[in-house]
Image (tube, helix red, strand yellow):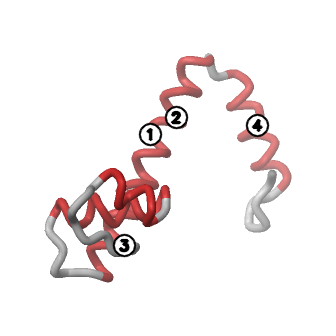
Amino acid sequence: MRSHDTSLDAYELQLRGYRQMSPARKSELVAELSETVRELAREGIRQRHPDYDTADVDRALVALVYGPEVARRVFPGTTVTPA
């Protein structure tokens, strides 16, 4: 799906690049992008909750991604506040 701020020529060039990538490179790219999204989410949690330590950020991220109920099961006996 083409972004509204991407020209058709740029989009087609990007598609050609993706089509030429090996499956291994595509997998690497997906993993890199997933890590980037997680880091952006963590940074957002830190900005909204500057008092959170690393464990609090981890719990909030799990609550954000999987929901508070799952986070409570993963981290029993702790307070889990969704980000």
Give the amino acid at mark 4. Answer: Leu
Give the amino acid at mark 3. Answer: Gly
Q: Nearer the viewer, residue 68 or 24?
A: 68
Quarter of the C terminus within the rendering: bottom left
- The total of numbered circles placed on residues is 4
Q: State the residue position of label 3.
A: 44
Q: Residue at x 27, y 58 (%)?
A: 58
Which disc number belongs to residue 15? Answer: 4
Residues at badges 3 and 4 in contact (C-beta under 8 Å)?
no
Q: State the residue position of label 2.
A: 29
Q: Is residue 16 left or right of residue 67?
A: right
Residue 73 lies in quadrant: bottom left
Up-down relation of residue 18 to residue 38 (above or below): above
For mark 3, does the 10 Å Cα neighbourhood hold few (<14), some (14 to 19), or many (20 or more) residues?
Answer: some
Give the amino acid at mark 1. Answer: Glu
Q: Residue at x 54, y 18 (%)?
A: 24
Q: State the residue position of label 1.
A: 32
For mark 1, does the 10 Å Cα neighbourhood hold few (<14), some (14 to 19), or many (20 or more) residues?
Answer: few
Q: Earlier in the sequence, mark 3 or mark 1?
A: 1
Give the amino acid at mark 2. Answer: Leu
Residues at badges 2 and 1 in contact (C-beta under 8 Å)?
yes
State the CA–CA distance, disc 4 to disc 2: 14 Å
> What is the secondary structure assignment of the residue under circle 1?
helix
State the CA–CA distance, disc 4 to disc 1: 18 Å
Up-down relation of residue 74 to residue 27 (above or below): below
* Residue 81, image x, y percentages: 34, 75
